[in-house]
Amino acid sequence: MENKGGKTDYLLSLIRNGQKLNGTQQLKLTAYLSLPAIMAQLSSIAMQYVDASMVGSLGANASASIGLVSTTTWLFWGICSAAATGFSVQVAHRIGAGDFEGAKRVLRQSVTAVMVFSLLLACIGMSISDALPRWLGGDEAIHHDSSVYFFIFSLFLPALQLNFLAGSMLRCSGNMRVPSALNVLMCLLDVLFNFFLIFPTRHWETPWGDLTIYGAGLGVEGAALGTALAELVTAALMMTYLFKRSPISRYSGECGSFMIRKTTLQTACRIALPMGFEHVAICGAQIMTTVIVAPLGIVAIAANSFAIIAESLCYMPGYGIAEAATTLVGQSLGAGRLKLMRRFAHITVWTGMGVMGVMGALMYIAAPQIIGIMTPVEDIRRLGTEILRIEAFAEPMFAASIVAYGVFVGAGNTLMPSLMNFGSIWGIRLTLAALLAPVMGLRGVWLAMCIELCFRGMIFLIRLWRGKWIFGLKRKRAE
């Protein structure tokens, strides 16, 4: 019997070869691509969950020091992800058209481009790390730890960038299993490194006598180093597989050099710049939210940070399905099969809404336990539970915006969705948060977020259903 990897490759080949896929095959292909991608996304957020839980045991100040700069780290993550996507979408289109040599050429050029970009970004991050906590309005007591955490994060940005690039390339080729497995490994490595780097040497009593566990006792600094080292190891393994093992992308001297071509870079910029703008807009809004939350006190900062991480467990499946949508839409477009592309768009969006609707219900029920794992401080646990339950109601519509965005990315249509995200977040979320925070505290900030996510999901669904994103796409082959 064929394994799922073989079935996935077979079904993707039907797209490239212009063969018919019935409804059952379309659903199976969506599931085969989505499940590993969901696992990869969940492992990524689990790594943040582990960091928060381990650091949370050190007290509210340690938790708040990471929470203060978390939105800025997401900003840099998003920019790195956009840079990788600008090239991986081109690879998906070429694979869909059966141009495997062209896909390899784009891949090689992308490595040079993103390495130069990530090194520049790392220099910027390290240069602002000292002043960042003050810019964000954090309490003086957490400035040093926040600054050190962000400096270490910035130092290892090139490794994170290569991780994003390799994973994105493999997923766009239809290989979801390897990135998923390596991201799970990254989570396990993060736990291992944190265990020895965060905590000091301690003694455990066992039936066979005292056991000495050696540790560096670095606290917040150890959490940053543990995550960075896990990312470095994973990036090395991911890039090795991409160039040595992947049948679509493994290196051969006949597939072009690593020198960047103008046309490849221009296409990457056309795709990535709106995405980068969108990530800057979203994370800039999150940073502004942090500025709104910071005056509410250390308990509010820590509760906000923990709730964001906890909610990520709910919406990460949506991002996994969005990655599947990008692959399916991108390869269908490359093959010139616009009707099939539209069917995959609708299948993935409805699947995402269903999955995240269930996750939202589970999050509402289990909110006290989810927050409780990350902190022993009762005030933080109580506030974190309340705001997490507010957000649970928005999850299906949040899914609509996430997966529909993945659809538009696969089509190379990123400008309008990016503007939609910008207008929704800055026009609705921040305005409402600024009005409600003085009256309702952190609960008002999260109520504003819930309202905005429902609005954003609706406008993305309207754009998807009206089909304007399809207009202007070049038909390479009749369906």
Image (spheres, helix red, strand yellow):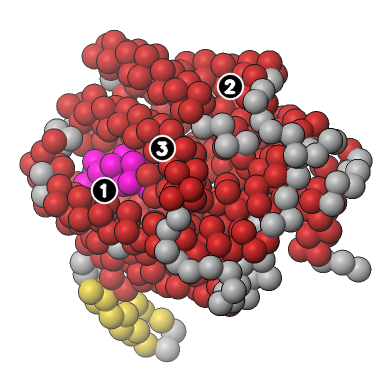
Neighbour tally class for label 3: few under 14, some 14-19, many 20 plus, Cα within 10 Å: some
Q: Looking at the picture, how far across and down is residue 236, in whole percent?
A: 45, 73
State the image quarter where residue 269 is shown: top left
Horizontal side of 308 relative to 328 (left or right) equals: left
Along the polypeptide, which appears first: circle 3 or circle 2? 3
Q: Earlier in the sequence, mark 1 or mark 2?
A: 1
Query: Of tags 3 and 1, which is closer to the observer?
Result: 3
Which residue does the image show at 52% across and 75% down from the upper left? 240
Q: Is residue 121 above or below residue 185?
A: above
Q: Is residue 253 left or right of residue 204?
A: right
Q: Name the residue furthest bottom.
A: 208
Task: Evaluate whether residue 146 shows in this view.
Answer: yes
The residue stretch that appears in magenta: 63-78
Which residue occupies the foreground of this view, 470 or 4? Answer: 470
Query: Label 2: which residue?
Result: 460
To which residue does mark 1 refer?
66
Q: Which mark is residue 218?
A: none
Q: Is residue 392 above or below residue 150?
A: above
Q: Which quadrant holds the C terminus? A: top right
**Spatial distance from mark 3 to mark 1, Cα to Cα?**
28 Å
Residue located farthest toward the front when viewing the structure as drawn? 262
Using the image as rendered, state which of residue 457 and residue 396 is in the foreground: 457
Instruction: Give the residue at x 28% y 42%.
Output: 72
Q: Of 360 and 231, which appears nearest the observer?
A: 231
Pointer 3 residue: 273
